[in-house]
Image: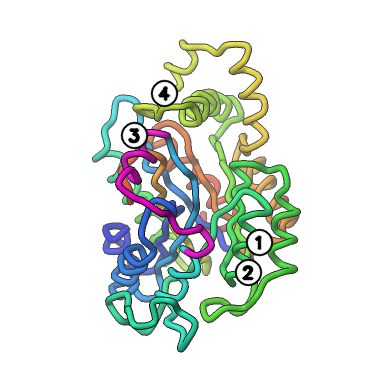
Amino acid sequence: MMHLADSTEHIRIGSGGVMLPHYSPYKVAENFRVLEALHPNRIDLGIGRSPSYQLVNRALNESKGKRLSYEQQIEDIRNFLSEPADGHRFQDLTAMPVIETAPELWLLGTGRGSAEIAADQGMSYAFAHLGNPEGGMDAVDHYRKNFRPSPLLESSKVMIAVFAVVAETAEKAEALATAFDLWLLTVESSSPPPYYPSVKTALERGVSALEREKIRHNRRRMFIGTPDQVAEKIRKAAETYQADEVTIVPNVFGAENRMKSITLLAEELGIKKV
Amino acid sequence: MVIYNVLDYSPIDEGSDGRQALLATTELANLAENWATGGSGYPNIIMCARLPAAVPKC
């Protein structure tokens, strides 16, 4: 993140996200304060709680004893970043460096549980439409209705995150989606994939009947098509959720394809002037 | 006005490597930076994520 922030001057840079249960809130707060100190008002701290693969979880946590609750971790990190006058259980400990600004705090989630925490802690809420579209409206509604202002955020703020597979033609988009299908199958299996498969690999491999059913289900999590088709779906989703922000994940095979994908979409959405 | 962001996982493409993946994310950030300074008025965010064990942590 520091490299990206150093390489740019205007855009915001954030994590999507730090899986907090694996780490110390104090340490994460210090890391992000360093980023914020050198790039004020350009840093977002996105937090999530994916347990990750079994071996990753073990490697990160096997030496740890008692674990803090997720809610306590979030409260701690919020306090380390906002330094309230009282009520902080580490009142005498300061996350360094001491700075005037704070990173924007986002809670990433897929349902009611995370929405409750984000509302209670006064954080921005990012709903992962790309992970589980079901229940999204319920989660976002609950968040908005129950939001409590915090020292870091005065009013509710909602982001949705969507997978987007975009190409100049519907045929090419479908071909890229075939590789995406395979990547998603492997990344959500019991062990991590060594790489993102090419379209050629995906087509040659084929899929089993069981995998085909899973793919059919997964396709509800992504927007596939030409720039105008995908832009329309994104606009509609943003309107449905009344989202303040949309995060687009152009997760297709090949850096050139990803670059092309997001450029086409940016032109269609009016982000990039043609 | 909706703010649009881009999240890049820095995926390691078949036939590529981790260094290339990270450089590609930087290239994407520079692309967004150009849009942000091109008068569009839209802030843009590049968010990098750590996919479990698949890519280096950003």
Few, some or many residues within 10 Å of mark 4 (<14, 14–19, 20+)? many
Q: Which residue is drawn at 61% across and 35% down?
A: A224
Q: Is residue A42 a member of the stretch shown in magenta?
A: no
Q: Is residue A58 a member of the stretch shown in magenta?
A: yes
Q: What residue type is labelled 2?
A: Asp
Is A269 on the left or on the right of A90, as rendered? Answer: right
Residue B37 rendering spot, x and y as whole percentages: 41, 67
- Kindly report which numbered mark, 1 or 3, lies closer to the viewer in this rendering: 1
Q: Which of A252 and A79 is in front in this view?
A: A79
CB contact under 8 Å: marks 1 and 3? no
Q: Which amino acid does label 3 sit on?
A: Ile
Q: Residue at x 39, y 82 (%)?
A: A91
Q: Distance between the residues labelled 1 and 2?
A: 6 Å
Residue ranking furthest to the left: B19
Start-end of magenta stretch: A54-72
Of all chains, the one bearing label 4 is A
Q: Do labels 2 and 4 share a chain?
A: yes
**What is the secondary structure assignment of the residue under circle 4?**
loop
Of all chains, the one bearing label 3 is B
Residue ranking furthest to the bottom: A85
Q: Name the residue under label 3.
A: B12
Is B38 on the left or on the right of A164, as rendered? Answer: left
- Kindly report which numbered mark, 4 or 1, lies closer to the viewer in this rendering: 1
